[in-house]
Image (cartoon, rainbow, N blue to C red):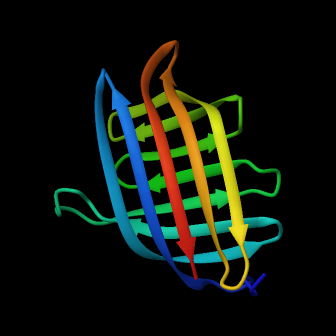
Amino acid sequence: MDDLSTSIPVGIHLETHTVQNGESSDYVIDVAGQIVQIGDTIYLRYAEPQESGEGADVPVTIKFMGDGDVSLTRRGENRVRLHFSAGKRVSAQYRTPYGIIPIETVTPQLKVGFTQRPFGGNAAIDYQLYAGQELLGNYEIRLQFTV
């Protein structure tokens, strides 16, 4: 693997497919980001542009852990840190200006792979988001990145 002990630039292609209340939507971005490895964890960071073009870009960190789990943190006006663990239900918090909403993810599919020379990777994460017993939506994330 390339030396990732210091942050290096990376190109990111991200596709998200969402189904909420029977309606589906798709979101695709291509952005530049940074990648760094600390111990057995790889951190991918980028700024997600706002769809409306208004407001500041939202900092996002995707953490690939040595045990195969993945977490995604968004630090905008609303803050959320989702943890994906294949086949498991995991608690999280969605922080809004109006308070904290407890949520949970269920991840039926989690596939992560890395390539060498040039270093890159991809992830396929399918998850369901719950508030209590209520299903808020089904999500599919497809991520590709290359240094």
Dividing the image into 4 quarters, which one contains the C terminus?
Answer: bottom right
Residue 114, image quadrant: bottom right
Residue farthest top in this picture:
133
Q: Which one is in front, 99 or 32?
A: 32
Q: Residue at x 76, y 72 (%)?
A: 38
Please state the horizontal and vertical placement of residue 51, each as a whole percent of the image: 22, 57
Q: Is residue 123 left or right of 103 when viewed as pictured? A: right
* Looking at the image, residue 11 lies above or below residue 55: below
Q: Is residue 139 left or right of 38 when viewed as pictured? A: left
Q: Residue at x 58, y 35 (%)?
A: 92
Residue 104, image quadrant: top right
Residue 91, image quadrant: top right
* Looking at the image, residue 138 lies above or below residue 70: above
Label count reads 0
Dividing the image into 4 quarters, which one contains the N terminus?
Answer: bottom right
Q: Residue at x 46, y 54 (%)?
A: 74
Please state the horizontal and vertical placement of residue 117, each as a whole percent of the image: 70, 85
Q: Which one is in front, 137 or 134?
A: 137
Please state the horizontal and vertical placement of residue 33, each as a whole percent of the image: 48, 76
* Looking at the image, residue 51 lies above or below residue 95: below
* Looking at the image, residue 122 lies above or below residue 11: above
Please state the horizontal and vertical placement of residue 34, each as a whole percent of the image: 54, 78
Q: Residue at x 67, y 79 (%)?
A: 119
